[in-house]
Each structure stands twice: as C-alpha cells, then as structure tokens.
Amino acid sequence: MVKNINFTGLTPEELEQFLKSIGQPKYRAGQIFSWIHGRVVQSFSQMTDLPADFRQQLENDCSLEVPNILSIHDSGNTGSRKFLMELSDGAKVEAVFLPEQKRRTVCISSQVGCPLACKFCATGMMGLVRNLTAAEIVAQLYAIKREVGGRITNVVFMGMGEPFLNYNAVIKAAQLIHHKSGLNIGARKITISTSGIASRIRQMADEKHPFRLAFSLNATTDQIRGHIMPINLKHDLTACLDSLEYYSSRTRQRVTVEYILLPGVNDSKEDAERLIKIIRRLRAKLNVIPFNPVPDTPYRQPNQNELKQFVSKVEPAVRRVTVRWSQGSDISAACGQLYAENVKRKRRPTDKTQQPA
Ligand code: SAH
Ligand code: SF4
C-alpha cells in the first residue's frame, strides 16, 4: 500500500480508485467518505462499519488531516470564536466560527499568508508562506465542527489568503463541503471571496460552479484601489468589472460586492456615487465592512456616524445593502490578525490566549 496517503482530500471517485488498487470493494469508498466528511471523525478506528483488520491497516498506512487547535479566542458579546490551528508541517492558519440567529457560519483560510499585500489587511503583511491543500482547507471546518457541535449552515472563504491564487484546491474543498454524503452545505451557502483575479472569475463562470462569488471592491477608482490593493495594478477595475459582468451573464447569479470602509480614504460623496454605479452595473448585492483596526496601518475604524452617513448615501439607490461589522472585533476577527498577535505573544504572552480543553 502507498504509505501515508491522506484520505481527507480525496473525492469519492478518487477513494474508489485507491481502494480498488489495494483490492478493496468499491462500496467502502462511500462508507469512508461519509465518515470523513459527514461525521467528521478524526481517526480510522472510529469507522465502525469497516472490518477491524482493515481499519488497522488504514491506521498504519494512511492518514487523515487533523489540524492541531493551538488556541481559541472567544468573543464575549457575539459568541464568535476564532481558532488558530497548526498543520502537519507546523504552518499556522486561522478559521472563525460566527454564530448568528439563523446562521452558523465558519470562515476558513485558503493560503498560509497571502502574497497580495493589501494595505489594510493583517494577512497581507505576512506575505505568502504556502498554498493549502483541499484537505487542509476542509479540515479547518471539521475541526471547528467537532469543537462547537451542531450544524454548520454557511461557509465563507474569507480567512487568510486569496482563494483564486489556489483555485483548484479551493474548488475541490468547496465540492467536498457541498457533497451530499459530506456536510451537504448548500452551494449558495458557500461563498468564495476574491480580491479580483479576473481570469479566475471567468474560469469559475465557464466551469459553472454553483458556489456564491464575492468580490472585494473596496475602492471605486483605479487610483485609490491601486494604492490600497496592489493587485489592482495587474487586474484593474475595468478587467475585474468586465469579468464579473461575464460571470453574472454566464451563470445568472448575482455577485456580492464587499466594500471595506476606510474613513478619509474611500468614504466621500463621490465614492458613494461611483459605488452606486458599479453596483447597478453588476446588479450586485453590497456588503459594507467597517475597517477592523490592524496595527501598523495608517487607517482607523469608522465611527457609527461615519458608517451611517456612507450607508445612507448608497442605500436608497441599490437593491440590497448589508453592513457587516467584522464580528467579534474584540477578538480581532479580521483575517490574519490572530496569527500576527500570536507571533507577538510568543515574545510577550498575555492571558487572553485560551487553550482548548
Ligand atoms: N483574499 C480574499 C479573501 C480573504 S479577505 C479577498 O480579499 O476577498 C476577506 C475580506 O476581508 C475581504 O473583503 C477583505 O477586504 C476584508 N478585510 C481584510 N482586512 C480587513 C480589515 N482589517 N477589516 C475589515 N475587513 C478586512
Ligand atoms: Fe490577501 Fe484578501 Fe488580505 Fe488582500 S484582503 S491581502 S487579497 S487576504
């Protein structure tokens, strides 16, 4: 048997192929898949409908992706919990559990770090360490599900990294999460957020993946966007908006436009007017995200009044606007921040870190 094949990243078809190669019947693939992705077990020994000797063989020769939870940060007021996890090579990623009244959302990472260096983003300051595998992406969700229990209703790829710079692994992970023998999360409840890799937006449209697409617009001119998001120099606003229009026309799906509010940078009357035009052109939903403070950036969080003023300018003109405070900003819920703090904490520990039981 091939030593140490990791089962967590395999589709049912890939599992079948592998099992065939070691002389096991096909139907075992379905059993194993639902143990891993439906019941999110951590070891082969828990797969009680497999023969004991086969379980032992798998235990010896194969592996499952089980990240080690290093710390859990609770937000007292919102119920959000942020997890710092260590992967098998020691790389660290963050994922967040965000419970609301009807939704229980998990936000997961697609890369360790991010190469795109957006000026407001803690992950952007780290640079790219590496891409995650599909197994490592879904394993973040499974680790959280084991910890919090109950049903997870929504998944967003809004943690560390740019999902479209790790396209194949991200799409595969979304398919595993969506699979009916897995967690069976609805395709429209799985959102992939991109900073705007135009070629991948077109690819996702051509491949007709059913997942939701969100675009981090964040500024309405190439000048401002290029300044806060260097990726705009490669994929400018025209390229991004054209590709999004193409996406909507091919898939008949509305995209969500995310707009991080940075007072004095992108919240003028003119910004609001340009934003309205873009939202109308894309027939998109708008999600305004007040900046969650990141140390060593020149930006500050908008106050309630600034936020209200900006939203009141766009609200009458667009179909649907939501405001999302980065939930649990008291636990630094914006992406990458926990990682950055953890690195600092290694030098000067604080009592905020809570070890899991
Ligand atoms: N790389 C992808 C997905 C991860 S970032 C992207 O950029 O879309 C997910 C979202 O968090 C993006 O909309 C980004 O603009 C936002 N974000 C990053 N840093 C933030 C901060 N400090 N405060 C609020 N939102 C932030
Ligand atoms: Fe990367 Fe998204 Fe952060 Fe920009 S906002 S640095 S693309 S993770």
Image (cartoon, helix red, strand yellow):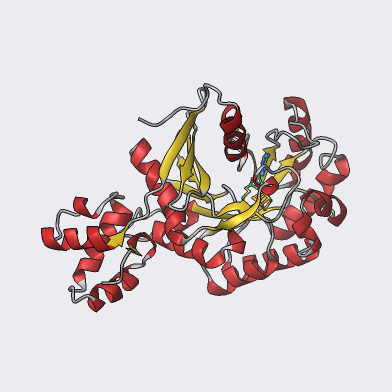
Q: In the image, residue 154 lies at what x, y percent?
A: 46, 47
Q: In the image, residue 64 lies at what x, y percent?
A: 33, 56
Residue in front for this viewpoint, 64 or 172: 64
Is 199 located above or below residue 321 in the figure? Answer: below
Residue in front for this viewpoint, 29 or 342: 342
On the question of residue 218 being in view, the answer is yes
In this rendering, position of residue 9 left or right of residue 106:
left
Residue under the point 30% across and 69% down:
15
Residue under the point 27% across and 58% down:
34
Q: Quarter-wise, where is residue 200 in the image?
A: bottom right
Q: Is the C terminus in the top left, top right, bottom left or bottom right quadrant?
A: top left
Residue in front for this viewpoint, 330 or 236: 330
Is 209 located above or below residue 148 in the figure? Answer: below
Q: Quarter-wise, where is residue 173 in the image?
A: bottom left
Q: In the image, residue 194 lies at what x, y percent?
A: 64, 56
Residue under the point 58% across and 66% down:
252
Is 223 located above or below residue 249 in the figure? Answer: above
Q: How many marks?
A: 0
Q: Is the N terminus in the top left, top right, bottom left or bottom right quadrant?
A: bottom left
Q: Quarter-wise, where is residue 250 in the image?
A: bottom right
On the question of residue 102 being in view, the answer is no
In this rendering, position of residue 28 left or right of residue 234:
left
Q: In the image, residue 159 lies at what x, y percent?
A: 56, 47
